[in-house]
Amino acid sequence: MDQEEVHERLASLRHGPWASKGKFALKTMYAPNLEEIVGRGEIDLSQIEPSGFNENETFIQRSLRYSGNVPVTDPKAQKLRGSLDSTFTHLQLMELAIQTGYLPSDVVRESARANLAAVLWSQPAQSFVQAYQYLPVAQLANRVDMTGLSDARPPEIQDDNALRFASFLASLRQLESSPFVSYWKQVADGQVGFQSGEAYLRYLSGESEESPRGTLKVLAGLREYVVTLADLVRSLPRGSEPPFVSFYRYWLDRLYVDITSTPGQFSRSWADALDVWVQNNLSSEKRSDPWVREERELLADSSSTLRRVWQQYALRSEPDWGLFVPSDRISLKPTLTRYGGLLQHDENLLSKG
């Protein structure tokens, strides 16, 4: 690989949507002695002590607590958590780029150590990695001699998977750039203050007849996420998905694990709610339009594909990437117009909920 190609591949990691979104976390969590920390040999992250006092330490600790199903309502805390997620996205991409032979480890090493130290000097940030299942971040830390975060061993490098990583990166860029996916993820993660995720789940499941504000945006984001990710997974050889799925593990859990607000009360997963909505609104008994059958089959197949890899996630660990082939089935405009008609919503989603 010549130097020009290396620079182009590095740029593809640096210039995604995650780069600009991650700036707030890097600025907020700045540690004065980072250069000295990064310059060491092996670093035990659990023993890092930044020189001086970061005036944001109390805010960082409060903002990065594990929230479970309890919504995080503080806008500044939401901003930090979202920005840190983008920073971790960049770090995960570094690790997966190395694993697949997309980039040599020595090219990424210095930048990886600097970015890891920039946020992981903070114990709350380390806990955030573990609580929200950023496995490739832990693998990268161990790969570049930064211990103390996890015992997760980085997989061996598969040099023949660079093209497949590039395809994966294209699908990720699509998801990260989508305002609808972003909105659904905020709702699913309890970060939309005016409406709880349970309200949308109740409506989609047919438990409530009242369509909450923003329902069409939530449905659009949920659909786009499921269809895009399933198309990527289907391109992988059967049984080889787990290393790839590790990147998406947290959100697959959000899709398939039931959300229960109160013990013994309403309980439903996003995937199940989507399945019920499809049955209630796209059934052949209710609608005979040709697009309805195609949409129903697409969503059923996509949901079952993701459920399979989610259930089998821990069974294998050998990376083998497939090719992501963009599909016009993911195109949202005609689908949103049709869904908008079903929900009797204005299809101008960006100006109205």
Image (cartoon, helix red, strand yellow):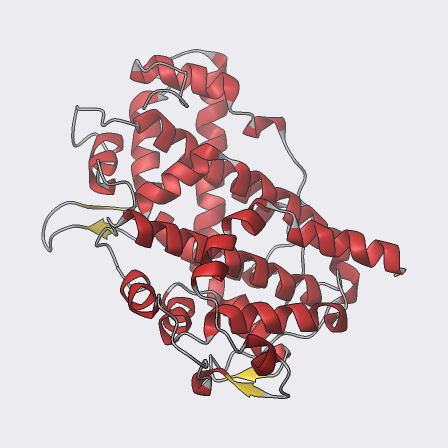
311 left or right, relative to 241? left
180 left or right, relative to 213? right
Location of residue 126 by image quarter: bottom left
In the rendered image, residue 336, in percent from the top left (x then y), is placed at 44, 20
Q: Nearer the viewer, residue 316 or 174?
A: 174
Would residue 78 be seen by someone viewing this image from the given angle?
yes
Quadrant in the picture for the N terminus: bottom right
Would residue 316 be seen by someone viewing this image from the given angle?
no
275 left or right, relative to 264? right
Q: Is residue 60 above or below residue 345?
A: below
In the rendered image, residue 39, in percent from the top left (x then y), is placed at 64, 82
Q: Is residue 320 above or below residue 236?
A: below
2 left or right, relative to 306? right
Quadrant in the picture for the C terminus: top left
Q: Which residue: 24% across, 54% down?
A: 69
Outermost right residue:
2
Q: Is residue 52 above or below residue 207?
A: below
In the rendered image, residue 226, in percent from the top left (x then y), is placed at 47, 40
Q: Which residue: 38% across, 56% down?
A: 81
Count of marks placed on residues: 0
Location of residue 184 by image quarter: top left
In the rendered image, residue 314, in percent from the top left (x then y), is placed at 47, 68
Q: Is residue 75 above or below residue 285?
A: below
Q: Nearer the viewer, residue 57 or 242?
A: 57
